[in-house]
Image (tube, rainbow, N blue to C red):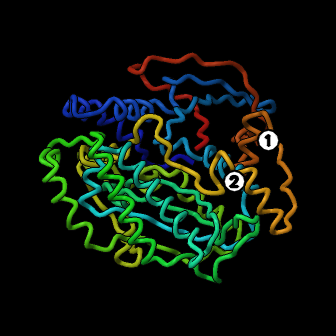
Amino acid sequence: MRPVLEVADIFRRHGDAFRAVQGSRLSQAQRRVMAAIEACRTAVLGGHVEQCEDCGEVRVAYNSCRNRHCPKCQGLARAQWLADRRAELLPVPYFHLVFTVPAPLAAIALQNKAVVYDILFKAAAETVRTIGADPKHLGAETGMIAILHSWGQTLTHHPHVHCIVPGGGLAPDGRWIACRPGFFLPVHVLSRLYRRLFLERLLDAFGDGRLNFFGNLAALAEPAAFARHLAPLRRIAWVVYAKRPFGGAEQVLDYLGRYTHRVAIANSRLLACEDGHVCFRWKDYRARDKAKTMTLAVDEFIRRFLLHVLPNQFRRIRHFGFLGNACRAAKLARIRTALALPEPTPVAQPADYRERYALLIGRRIDLCPCCGGRMVEAGFRVRTPRNSPPDHHMRCDTS
């Protein structure tokens, strides 16, 4: 069912005015995201006509934009990704780690997303790998799935990486070494090493001229000012959060599903857009997840949403260690041998989009909303110009 209000509705009503005010301050990537979300599942992107074989009901199914920032286009991508991961799960405890950065570095990250987000990924992965390989802790190669989020509940810029880590590792001799029950790696050790590795990589990026500073951070382009900016960060504790192990493989998949293909705000959290303001729900984690509402001026809401547009071709889900893309199949086979596990049985995926959607999402989109009969394609609809009047045919929403 379509939500009462969508991000697309806000963009369609107020996007032109926002773009006019922002002018050159709005990047091409941000403009493309806005355009994609506005056009998603409308006649602008074209579609096809479906008709019920039994009662003759006709509906138009418009194409989706498939943009990774679009709140409506993540369902099937998420389900397919989780289905692919299912065969890779191991019957071992899994842990959830979160690596964050202090606020002064988040400001630098906002002006240097590709460089600093990449440092965040690599510092987190190297931290887990290094401490896991230490015989004092585990003495084995670890594996990790890392997912970048750049937002907090109120859409402010808060870059952090969620990591799902199997509780153990692959020893050089091929044995599986399990971690202690209910405990993966010491958080205080992770925090100190992560801080050092992150700052080292950041200094290297500065020295190589890969960081840019403007606006209120322009002074940091001077080496002495940059060093002074980082000095206090060496003395504070950096937050690395570790959750207790998951209950089992299905819980791991459920948890991954909450994080992998999220966007800055779900349409279901939007409450109203009126009188130039947007109201939405949010959870206050500092008040025991208390549900609250926030109202922002519409320009501020759009600005905050666009803070989280990623650089082109930036990968926000990454795999490390024995789950790395280059070695995953071979090393998982060694781990299954060590744990005496059978090889997973491949699951065939239907070629038809609607059958695949039903298998992965659990909802049929080929059934008539009136009589339950089968909807079949009855033709195609050409794209219409962006400024054309809206099409009022019934629409098939597969979000």
Q: Nearer the viewer, residue 284 or 157?
A: 157
Amino acid type, residue under disc 2 in the picture: Arg
Please tell me which residue lies in front, 70 or 159. 159
Helix, strand or loop for disc 1: loop
**Residue 126 image position (x, y, % from top left):** 49, 59
Residue picked out by circle 2 = 85
Quadrant location of the C terminus in the rendered image? top right
Q: Quadrant of residue 282?
A: bottom left
Label 1 or label 2, whichever lies nearer to me, is 2
Q: Residue placed at 79% from the left, 34% from the top?
A: 351
Looking at the picture, how far across and down is residue 4, in whole percent? 45, 49
Could you tell me which secondary element the residue under label 2 belongs to?
Answer: helix
**Mark 1 residue type:** Gln
Residue under the image location 57 percent in, 16 percent down: 382
Which class describes the residues within 10 Å of circle 2: few (<14), some (14-19), or many (20+)? few
Q: Position of residue 78 (x, y in %)?
A: 61, 49
Q: Residue at x 59, y 39 (%)?
A: 397
Within-10-Å neighbours for mark 1: few <14, some 14–19, many 20+: few
Q: Position of residue 128 (x, y in %)?
A: 52, 65
Please tell me the numbered disc located at residue 124: none
Residue on which disc 1 sits: 349
